[in-house]
Amino acid sequence: MSKKKAFITGINGQDGSYLSEYLLELGYDVHGIVRRNSTSENQSTRLEHFESNIKTYYGDLLDQGGIERILDAIQPDEVYNIAAQSHVRISFDIPQFTAQTNAIGVLNMLEAHRRCCPKAKFYQASSSEMFGLTVDEDNYQRETTAMNPVSPYGCAKVFGYNIVRNYRRAYGLHATNGILFNHESPRRGTNFVTNKVAKAAARIKLGLQDELELGNMDSYRDWGHSWDYVRAMHLMLQQEHPGDWVVSTGETHSVRQMCDLVFGYHDLDYNDYVVQNPKFMRPEELPYLRGDSTKIRTELGWLPKYTFKMLMEEMAEHWVNFYKARNSA
């Protein structure tokens, strides 16, 4: 029996690397694209321990012709569109690029998919940022919650979400949206608040840094682990029919609570080291996100394995080990 083939955009990002690793464990033949100018502090190491087992190609979501040539050659069984300009705060600085990548990029992927491998199953990485300021009466956001985004990132993601649903109906594609709430890991870029805090706390403990500048300390997020969430992505594409599913832990924590936990891991008080800097505030803040993932739990049987405490302690430990290894080298 031939191996299933998966094609992943953003394969060298946090989610792409975990998804690749998971699919390899399941016996998949894994292919993916990277942008030639993709750089990140930890990006080069995300794939290194299994890079020889995957096939990567240079590509860009804005180059539909290039994507078509790759898909036509591979003929994948599953397509995971995870690539994006994924930083919400930065989307205010580069709104045009964010819209091109996160909206038109999705359309390009769908067109390439429709033309080259219409029988394949398609996954789109949608986002809880689409809900914006809207919260249901029970203080949760779910598949039926109205979308009211408050950032260029969220607005672009709403277009991507809707064009997936449109192509599903118009062309009969097996095209699915995963509405993922915040998900983190040691592989997260250090310009994201969770790994920014985890790295800084380790450096402060070791005397390598004096303080940490952050933006809004009182924004609440539903944070899970990327490893749990890529399992959900795969599970969605194993279904006979496509759909839209929220993926979340159902818990919400503030940036302040997160700092308390991570600095506490090092026996430090974050109040002694964290200062607020307005440059890290968004022009329009999103104060609260909390997802209701009842649908995917009941219909598909997905459950997260990581708690918030487990997630943040893993990230804190990663940076301790990173600097210990550097000092012993």
Image (cartoon, rainbow, N blue to C red):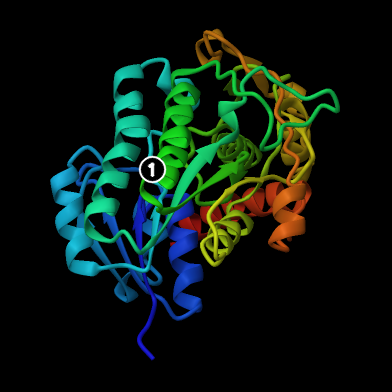
Q: Residue at x 55, y 15 (%)?
A: 150
Mark 1 lies on a secondary structure that is helix
**How many C-alpha atoms fall within 10 Å of the one at disc 1: few (<14), some, or many (≥20)?**
few
Front residue of this view, candidates 41 and 53: 53
Q: What type is the residue that disc 1 sits on? A: Ala
Front residue of this view, candidates 232 and 199: 232
Toward the right, the furthest residue is 138
Front residue of this view, candidates 194 and 85: 85
Q: Residue at x 34, y 54 (%)?
A: 44
Instruction: Judge from the rendering whether residue 104 lies leftward or rightward of residue 308; answer left or right.
Output: left
Instruction: Judge from the rendering whether residue 55 lies leftward or rightward of residue 174; answer left or right.
Output: left
Rendering quarter of residue 74: bottom left
Q: Residue at x 32, y 46 (%)?
A: 110
Q: Which residue is mark 1?
A: 170
Instruction: Judge from the rendering whether residue 226 lies leftward or rightward of residue 328; answer left or right.
Output: right
Position of the N terminus by quadrant: bottom left
Instruction: Judge from the rendering whether residue 178 lies leftward or rightward of residue 255; answer left or right.
Output: left
Q: Position of residue 121 (x, y in %)?
A: 42, 60
Q: Position of residue 280 (x, y in %)?
A: 53, 16
Q: Residue at x 61, y 21 (%)?
A: 132
From where the camera sits, is residue 162 visible?
yes
From where the camera sits, is residue 304 visible?
no
Q: Position of residue 115 (x, y in %)?
A: 22, 53
Q: Position of residue 273 (x, y in %)?
A: 68, 24
